[in-house]
Image (spheres, rainbow, N blue to C red):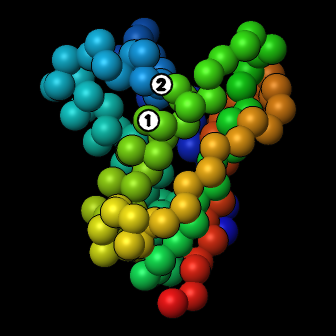
């Protein structure tokens, strides 16, 4: 199963909150809470279409807009944080610890100027 996640959340009409660790660590907790809520609202229809899982592997693939070099761990770590919290909140996994998500992989896809995004592949692990 594949989920498509945005590279940023529209914070106000003119301000974007880019989902990356450099922005995250310097942002006020109220803004972080607000953007997390907006992220969950954005991703909710895709998550609700998923079945309930006991154990999954997550594979994050980055498709940036430009050829500018970037630290994929910087970007995908925040996507992982927000996405895993959303999976728990929408009751798709019991918790977001290693018992339920034992493997997480970060990948670079390719530059996609027309549709920059993060694709999240969810693979169910049979227990």
Q: CA distance from mark 1 to mark 2?
A: 6 Å
Image side of residue 6 versus residue 116, left or right:
left
Q: Nearer the viewer, residue 13 or 57?
A: 57
Image side of residue 74 versus residue 85, left or right:
right
Q: Position of residue 12 (x, y in %)?
A: 35, 17
**Label ID, residue 34:** none
Find disc 2 in the rendering and name its residue: 20
* Quarter of the rendering containing residue 32: top left
CB under 8 Å between discs 1 and 2: yes
Residue in the picture at 19% in, 17% down: 28
Is the residue 117 above or below the residue 114 in the image?
below
* Quarter of the rendering containing residue 31: top left
Q: Position of residue 108 (x, y in %)?
A: 75, 36
Is the residue 75 above or below the residue 83 in the image?
above
Residue in the picture at 17% in, 25% down: 29
Q: Nearer the viewer, residue 12 or 121?
A: 121
Find disc 1 in the rendering and name its residue: 78
Secondary structure beneath label 2: loop
Residue in the picture at 82% in, 26% down: 111
Disc 1 or 2, which lies upstream in sequence?
A: 2
Q: Quadrant of the N terminus?
A: bottom right
Residue in the picture at 44% in, 35% down: 78
Q: Nearer the viewer, residue 13 or 113?
A: 113
Is residue 3 visible in this depiction of the protein? no
Within 10 Å of disc 2 (Cα), the crowding (few <14, some 14-19, many 20+) is some
Is residue 51 visible in this depiction of the protein? yes
Q: Position of residue 93 (x, y in %)?
A: 38, 73
């Amino acid at each position: 199963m594949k989920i498509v996640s945005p590279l940023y959340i529209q914070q106000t009409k003119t301000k974007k909150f880019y989902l990356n660790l450099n922005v995250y660590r310097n942002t006020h907790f109220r803004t972080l809470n607000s953007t997390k809520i907006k992220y969950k609202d954005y991703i909710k229809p895709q998550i609700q279409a998923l079945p309930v899982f006991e154990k999954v592997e997550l594979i994050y693939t980055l498709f940036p807009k430009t050829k500018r070099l970037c630290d994929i761990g910087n970007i995908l770590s925040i996507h992982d944080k927000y996405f895993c919290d959303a999976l728990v909140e929408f009751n798709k996994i019991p918790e977001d610890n290693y018992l339920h998500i034992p493997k997480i992989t970060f990948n670079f896809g390719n530059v996609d100027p027309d549709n920059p995004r993060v694709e999240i592949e969810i693979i169910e692990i049979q227990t």
